Structures are given as structure tokens and as C-alpha cells.
Amino acid sequence: MLLGMFKKYIGWIFMIWLSGAHRCISASPSCRAPIVNGGYVVPQQDTYSHGTVLPYACENGFKPAVEGWWATTTCQNGKWSTQPQCIGVNNCIPPTIPHAKYTSSQTGWYEDGYVIRITCDPGYSSKDWDATTQCVNGKWLSVPICQRSTQACDDPPKIPHAVIINQGPRRDVYASDTEILYECEDGYDVEGKHKKSIYCISGAWSAAPPCIKQTKPTPGSSTSTGSETGPAGGGGSSTNTGSPDPQVTTIDQCGTNPIVADGEVVERDPMFLKYQCGSFYKQVGPDKVFCYTNGQWSTLPTCKASYCSVDTDQYPQLKYDGVKYINDGESVRLECVKLDHWLTDHYSVGRCNNGRIQLGKCCNWWELKFNSC
């Protein structure tokens, strides 16, 4: 009897503890009503329970700082997943540009008239050299596109009896001039002083010095090696017939440095030359140039003019200031000839886009700042 009563009391205690524990687990903190300047939430309450999905919208003249005319936020452990925010209809939310990076805004949005410049990921290049876009009346004009570079490479070729040693996760695209190191398996090695590496050169991988099985010399015989494989990724053969694919060697084997018009050598490495174009020129092609064992240089870069020129003497509305040069994708303020009824100086904004200059009308500082010109 005593044992039965003990079990009964233990059961009641367990049920009370379980109920309390359940309340502790389920009692996640609630969220206070968010403040939405220029907008409203539905329904309007003082607090919202954990897990509540709260929709909101904006008043006339405003829009959510996300895609669409309405948005939602979720209460999670006493905090909202995103802070509801309404911005002016003429402002812009961050654009989505695959394979590109640009300076992010601390506010989460960009003012009307703001210009961003993108940088494409390695292995990609901006289409038509267009690397800027501007927020105008709530929309981005001509959003740049990062497309795969014609100089980029696919996966590196398989190198028999070797493994890649300096790469992380596999990539979809390898930028031009990428160097990949490899190591031969035990009992194999490359001949001579060849470096165990391959380069992405103008969309193709250089031939890899093959890993050759090392044989131990026997008494009375000379040291020899037996080649089981040809160069990786190429049409070479282990036999002596035909010409093997040229391999990258030290640059001193190719003689005088090649000349790149409007460019110069900025880095000299035993294995490559690195070029850079001068101001107002854009480099097309690989940054680095390699020397092949056949004495030929790899594909050279070219420097293409990438600027606009404005002869202020040719524009009556502009104050004479000689010839101004503007990098492609950039803009400058050019002072206008002051008219009698102007109280302050006026300026025309010149923007260079794909080699063409666009001049705006003459406006004062206030009009330019708030894009009301």
C-alpha cells in the first residue's frame, strides 16, 4: 500500500515538473511593435508572439527597402528578423549583379543619383566595359553584367601520377594567369628543373611537365628514366615521334621583353612578366606573359583607350579650362560660364560612358546635390 501511494505521489510530481518545463520551453520572448517611419504594419499591436510573421507596407511617396510594394518580418526570440524600413520612392535598393562586388551601403539603400562601380569576380569581366550604374528615380540605369572572361579556363587537366596541392574547393572558372601547383606521387618526379605547375593562359592551360617514374640505376648501367605519360591536357606523346607541346620555362629563354603599346612591365618574375596599362587605358587580355620552351612568348595583353576628352573651348556654355580627360565610367563637374542672373557658380556634369561623353545642363551646387537639376 505504501509503495502504491509513493508511486502515485511521484507521478503527480513528474506531471507538475513536465508542465512547468513545457511552459519554460514554449515561453519564448515576444517582440515589441516595430517603428516603421513612413509605413504601417498589419495588425497593429503593442507586442507580437514568437514566430509571428508581420506584413508591412509604406505610405504614398515611400516604398519598402526590399523588392515589392509590401514585405514581411518575423519575430524570433524577441527580435525581428529584419527591421521594417520605408525609403523614398526615388531611392534604390541594392542591385543584384551575379559574379560582381560593389561598395555596400550602411543604410541598406542608395540615394537617388548615387553611382556605384562594380568589380567582377576573378574569371569574369564586365560586358561592354560598362562597370557603373546610377540610381535614377528609384531604378538603376543599365545595370552592368559580369560575364565569363574569354581569357578564363575550365577545370585544370588531369595530370597522371599527380595531385593538385594549392587549391581549395573546385571552382567553375579559373581566371587568366592562375597558377596551379601539383606534386607527383611517390616514385615519380619531373625531369630537370621544371616547376611543378601549370598556368591558365588565354583560356587554355599550359602543358604540365609530366611525372615520370624514377628508376634506380643498376651496376654497370647508366641512370635512365622511363616516361609513362605525355604532358597533361595536351596532344603530346611519350614516344619520340612528333613535337611535344611547348611548356612554360624561365623568361630568360625568350630573350628581349615583348613591347606592349601604352603598357609597361610592373613585375619581373623568373617565370613571367606582368604588364600594366597606363592611365586612361584599359587592359585587354592576360596580365602575365610567359615564355615557352620553343622560344615564343604567350599571348600579349593590349591596352585599349578607355576615356573621353572634353575640349572646353568647343562648348560655349563651359568656362575655358583646356582639354579634360575622364576615365570611362566616371564623371566630373565642369564649371559653366556665369550668367548675370545666377547668384552662385553653376556646373555641368560630364560622364564618360563607353568612350562617349554626356554633358548635363548647368546647375548650381544645391540642384546637383539633390539631383533636382
Image (cartoon, rainbow, N blue to C red):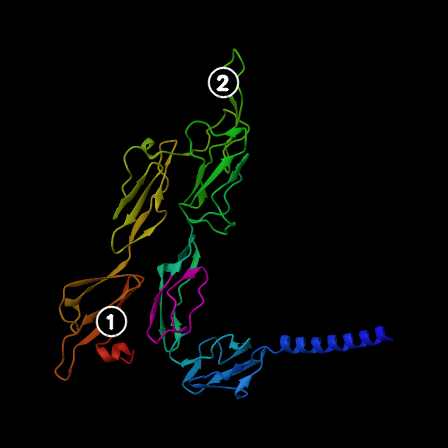
Image coordinates for residue 115, horizontal then vertical, percent? 33, 69
Q: How many marks?
A: 2
Q: Quadrant of the C terminus?
A: bottom left
* Above-or-below relation of 215 to 164: above
Label drawn at residue 223: 2
Image coordinates for residue 50, horizontal then vertical, percent? 58, 78
> Which amino acid is tagged 2?
Thr
Q: Main secondary structure of the magenta part?
A: loop
Judged from the image, the secondary structure of the residue bearing numbered disc 2 is loop
Q: Which residues are magenta?
A: 93-118
Q: Is residue 157 left or right of residue 127?
A: right
Q: Quadrant of residue 362?
A: bottom left
> Which amino acid is tagged 1?
Val
User: Which residue is at the front of the view, 227 or 348?
Assistant: 227
Q: Is residue 267 left or right of residue 164?
A: left
Image coordinates for residue 129, horizontal then vertical, percent? 35, 59
Of the residues under marks 1 and 2, which one precedes in the sequence? 2
Q: Quadrant of the N terminus?
A: bottom right
Judged from the image, the secondary structure of the residue bearing numbered disc 1 is strand
Residue at 23%, 76% (x, y): give it.
361
Q: Quadrant of residue 255?
A: top left
Q: Within 10 Å of the Cα at label 1, are there few (<14), some (14-19), or many (20+) other Cα atoms?
A: some
* Above-or-below relation of 277 to 316: above
- Work out which residue is located at the far right of the displayed protein and give it: 1
Label drawn at residue 349: 1
For residue 110: magenta? yes
Image coordinates for residue 183, horizontal then vertical, percent? 49, 36
Residue at 28%, 45% (x, y): give it.
266
Q: CA distance from mark 1 to mark 2?
A: 74 Å
Q: Depth-wise, is mark 1 or mark 2 nearer the camera? A: 2
Q: Is residue 66 left or right of residue 116?
A: right
